[in-house]
Image: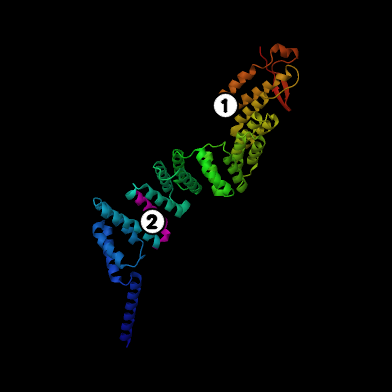
């Protein structure tokens, strides 16, 4: 009785195992397992010629999606067969079709590996059908559209290359190239922010390809994007793309540039957009809005000190050159070293120019005292930053000519080396008397 029970148990176990195996390996489980075993052995030996027919049997008898290596090995086998039959054009094309199908099957049954599979598919399209620019371009764009900023940066560069070729062959128009550039730029910039090791170089390559494409004229950009902007001025992605295109093209005089930056600053304000507005307003001689925007950029808590220092230098220079507002220019200049000590030399140069531009009331000595203060600052500038020495020395030599003569100073009981307080244009500064002999 015990023997009978044990026998029945073994039979049940055997049937259960067969059912499990059949469930996994399909209704032709024996042929499936046999084919898998034999072709895999040949693959390990590197004998793809013998592996090929057995692999086909495995594809025939095994259920779809059984294992990913079935499709990966299929890629290797078809690559081998394509090379083996390169003299037979018709067969070779069928084999290429089969190779590409392997990538799609792998994607279908193993979607986690879709990015790698589809990227390799595009590379093989380029490898085997690279002479068809439109086919390659469509494959590249399909990949980029599907995977977005997960797409490989090198595929984005290749897409830009093919777009240029298609444009030169009159197969696409200028708007298609510009739209592509607007699409690729934010993707690769996102990858740079994510520290993708290839993204920075890809961005340079894409920018260079666009620059030499022949489509990036201000006229083309404005003609293409003005209607789009007017239809959707609050679309951040669209507006950002327009700003980048116009900036890269040096189209600073275009009204569309100013409108787009104003929209971007309204949608997503930052010190970057405020600074952009300053640059554009200054070009248009809109001084009030220019200084307001630049001050807004400086006041933004997100702006780092070193950038604040540079912007303060620009602000002071703008007040001096455009508005002749010496007090505000001096105020900006004095803040520069507090933000970035390495720019102290430039701050002193600016202060020297402020004093040289001032007006001083009083007698012949008092009215010329500003030159002493200006020279003091230029000396400080070259001492703080040796790269400014040549420029500072030229200004020192120029302004020393305006020092009072020794006999003129003597008439006012003033001699070289005396301390003197200069008072000009609402500013006061202590300096040292120097005269011309």
Question: Which comes before the other along the chain, label 1 or label 2?
Answer: 2
Which of the pair 279/163 is nearer the observer?
A: 163
Q: Secondary structure at mark 2?
A: helix
Name the spot of residue 77 as percent of width and height, x first.
29, 57
Name the spot of residue 371 as percent of width and height, x first.
67, 21
Which of the pair 324/354 is nearer the observer?
A: 324
Q: CA distance from mark 1 to mark 2?
A: 57 Å
Which corner quadrant of the image does residue 27 belong to? bottom left
Task: Give the crowd class for mark 2: few <14, some 14-19, many >=20 residues within 10 Å.
Answer: many
Residue at position x 34%, y 68% in the image: 63
Disc tally is 2
Task: Give the crowd class for mark 1: few <14, some 14-19, many >=20 residues within 10 Å.
Answer: some
Name the spot of residue 7 as percent of width and height, x first.
31, 83
Q: Residue furthest bottom?
A: 1
Tell me the number on the disc at residue 388: 1
Disc 2 marks which residue?
117
Q: Secondary structure at mark 1?
A: helix
* Region rendered in magenta: 109-126
Please tell me whether residue 409 is drawn above or below residue 216 in the rendered image: above
Name the spot of residue 175 as percent of width and height, x first.
47, 44
Q: Is residue 111 found inside the magenta-colored segment of the image?
A: yes
């Amino acid at each position: 009785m015990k023997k009978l029970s044990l026998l029945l148990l073994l039979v049940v176990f055997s049937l259960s195992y067969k059912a499990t195996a059949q469930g996994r390996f399909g209704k032709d489980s024996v042929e499936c397992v046999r084919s898998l075993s034999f072709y895999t052995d040949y693959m390990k030996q590197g004998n793809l010629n013998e592996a090929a027919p057995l692999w086909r049997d495995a594809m025939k008898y095994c259920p779809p999606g059984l294992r990913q290596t079935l499709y990966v090995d299929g890629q290797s086998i078809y690559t081998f067969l394509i090379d083996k039959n390169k003299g037979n054009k018709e067969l070779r094309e069928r084999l290429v079709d089969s190779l590409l199908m392997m990538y799609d099957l792998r994607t279908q049954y193993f979607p986690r590996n879709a990015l790698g599979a589809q990227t390799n598919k595009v590379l093989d399209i380029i490898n085997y059908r690279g002479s068809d620019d439109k086919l390659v371009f469509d494959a590249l764009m399909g990949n980029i559209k599907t995977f977005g900023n997960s797409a490989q940066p090198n595929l984005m560069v290749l897409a830009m290359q093919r777009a240029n070729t298609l444009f030169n062959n009159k197969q696409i128009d200028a708007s298609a190239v510009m739209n592509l550039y607007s699409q690729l730029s934010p993707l690769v910039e996102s990858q740079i922010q994510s520290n993708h090791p290839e993204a920075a170089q890809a961005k340079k390559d894409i920018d260079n390809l666009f620059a030499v494409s022949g489509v990036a004229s201000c006229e083309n950009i404005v003609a293409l994007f003005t209607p789009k902007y007017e239809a959707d001025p609050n679309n951040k992605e669209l507006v950002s793309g327009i700003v980048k295109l116009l900036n890269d093209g040096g189209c600073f005089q275009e009204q569309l540039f100013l409108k787009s930056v104003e929209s971007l600053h309204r949608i997503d304000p930052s010190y970057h957009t405020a600074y952009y507005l300053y640059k554009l307003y200054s070009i248009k001689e809109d001084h009030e809005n220019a200084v307001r925007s630049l001050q807004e950029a400086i006041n933004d808590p997100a702006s780092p000190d070193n950038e604040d220092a540079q912007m303060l230098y620009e602000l002071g220079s703008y007040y001096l050159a455009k508005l002749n507002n010496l007090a505000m220019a001096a105020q900006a200049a004095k803040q520069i070293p507090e933000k970035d000590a390495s720019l102290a030399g430039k701050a002193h140069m600016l202060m020297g120019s402020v004093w040289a531009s001032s007006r001083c009331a009083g007698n012949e000595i008092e009215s010329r005292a500003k030159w002493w203060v200006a020279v003091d600052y230029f000396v400080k500038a070259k001492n703080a930053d040796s790269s400014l020495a040549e420029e500072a020395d030229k200004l020192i030599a120029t302004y020393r000519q305006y020092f009072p003569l020794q006999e003129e100073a003597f008439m006012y009981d003033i001699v070289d080396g005396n301390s003197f307080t200069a008072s000009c244009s609402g500013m006061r500064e202590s300096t040292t008397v120097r005269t011309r002999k």
